[in-house]
Image (cartoon, rainbow, N blue to C red):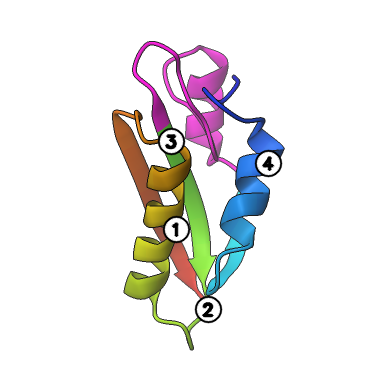
Amino acid sequence: MNLPSAPRDAVTELVLGSSGVAAVFPPRVADAVAGALGSVAPLVAGRAASESVQVRIAADASAGAADTGREVADLLLARFPDADLIRVQVDRIQ
């Protein structure tokens, strides 16, 4: 799946460039299977029908997970102002 306005790698780089982000995780197995069927967008994704951007990250413990999540969300909102859904999931604090 392609993002509405940028390649997947460019958005991943944008997220990794955010202070406090230690890693961007690959999709979970269930999400990857569903994504292959077209019902779930894995890792960093967008769908033309309902523009959504979803990321799974690890936050650096020294930066604060909540602050890191907000910063990533703000970056994605700025990059995709017309997105219907921006979801930032902090899966781990390192």
Residue linked to disc 4: 10
- The answer to the question of whether label 1 and label 2 lie on touching residues, with beta carbons closer than 8 A, is no
Q: Are marks 1 and 3 in contact (CB under 8 Å)?
A: no
Whole-number angstrom distance, CA of label 1 to CA of label 2: 13 Å
**Element at label 2:** loop
* Numbered range of the magenta stretch: 26-52
Q: Earlier in the sequence, mark 1 or mark 2?
A: 2
> What's the distance in space between the residues labelled 2 and 3, CA to CA?
24 Å
Which label belongs to residue 80? Answer: 3
Q: Nearer the viewer, mark 2 or mark 3?
A: 3
Instruction: Inspect the image, locate mark 2, and give the three-letter code of the amino acid beneath it.
Output: Asp
Label 4 SS: helix
Q: Earlier in the sequence, mark 3 or mark 4?
A: 4
Task: In the displayed orientation, state which residue is furthest to the left.
Answer: 84
Mark 4 belongs to which amino acid? Ala
Q: Which residue is mark 2?
A: 60
Mark 1 touching mark 4, by CB under 8 A? no
- 73 over 11 or under it: above or below: below
Give SS at disc 3: loop
Left or right? Give the position of 9 relative to 76: right
Residue at point 32% right, 71% down? 66
User: Which of 87 and 5 lies nearest the eye of the viewer?
Assistant: 5
> Where residue 29 sits: x, y (%)?
55, 36
Upstream in sequence: badge 2 or badge 3: 2
Residue 72 bears which disc, if any? 1
Residue 25 x %, y %: 59, 52
**Total labels drawn:** 4
The kind of residue tagged 3 is Phe
What secondary structure is the stretch in magenta mostly built from?
A: loop
Contact, mark 4 vs mark 2 (Cβ under 8 Å)? no
